[in-house]
Image (cartoon, rainbow, N blue to C red):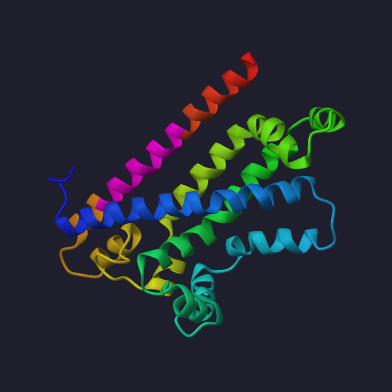
Amino acid sequence: MVGWLTPEEWTAVRLSLLVATAAMLASLPFGLAVAWLLARGRFRGKSLLDALVHLPLILPPVVTGYLLLVWFGRRGPVGALLEEYFGIVLSFRWTGAVLASAVMGFPLMVRAIRLSIEAVDRKLEDAAGTLGASPLWVFFVVTLPLCLPGVIVGMILCFAKAMGEFGATITFVSNIPGETQTLPSAIYTFTQVPGGDAGAMRLTLISIAISVSAMIVSEWLAHVVRRRIAAG
């Protein structure tokens, strides 16, 4: 595959895989926590939290990217603090692409995990609780193993969304070759220059191959987990 792609195209592929994987892993702890709160929690503002979580799916991606730029840019309230105290710069960096992709994929992850948690029999959790287990222990020992197929699906959905994210990413971190140019951005660049159709088609085929592979792996892992749960 490396010989088929130019060095610049290969860089875009590697960067996309890095950004999507980092976005998926960074979202997972928060996705588990928020999904559990929405599935099991009883508190004021639950509907508001649910709406905020799903807001990136409703807003135009460019709007989400602009809001990230306002808040996490070097002059933004959060971005300025990160740079001053931790030396972290997100805008126009690949780390910013991770943040933008994570924000866009987060709702898909939360929804898949939430539905899986809601499908877990509450009687099993209550039984563990009556034996003295804390809510956190019940989650890790009872709930999480039973909802693991949904967690895997949520992770893959987040990864796939991150791989295809364009609007929020290009607005927040621009389209800098070797730094923030992911597969969608590279494809867009090829479509804007004469004779770029071949490069756009190559990257499109790579994108399709990665997405299909991710879905196949997701289905296989979920199947293996379901079999183990049934056997146990």
Q: Is residue 131 left or right of residue 107?
A: right
Give me the residue at 53% from left, 55% from top.
105
Instruction: Judge by depth and name the residue closer to the eye, 118 or 94.
Output: 94
Side of 102 relative to 231 (left or right): left
Q: Residue furthest bottom?
A: 75
The residue stretch that appears in magenta: 203-217
| Residue 163 visible in this rendered orientation of the protein | no
Residue 107 on image: x %, y %: 60, 55
Q: Looking at this view, is 81 or 155 the one in front?
A: 81
Q: In the picture, which quadrant includes the C terminus? A: top right
Query: What kind of secondary structure does the magenta stretch mostly adopt?
Result: helix
Q: Image quadrant of residue 113?
A: top right
75 w.r.t. 39: above or below: below
Verify whether residue 213 appears in magenta.
Answer: yes
Is residue 81 placed above or below 153 in the rendered structure? below
> Where's the N terminus, which quadrant?
top left
Examine the structure image and report whether residue 194 is included in the region drawn in magenta.
Answer: no
Image point (74%, 35%), residue name = 138
With 45 as the anchor, is 19 left or right in this view? left
Q: How many discs mark residues in the rendered view?
A: 0
Residue occupying the point 64% across, 30% down: 145
Q: Whole-percent x and y of residue 27?
A: 54, 53
Residue 165 on image: x %, y %: 43, 59
Residue 137: tell me if it is visible: yes
Q: Residue furthest top?
A: 231
- Where residue 44 appears, as percent x and y from the top left, is 85, 61
Outermost residue to the right: 130
Query: Which residue is drawn at the image coordinates 52% and 79% (left, top)?
Result: 81
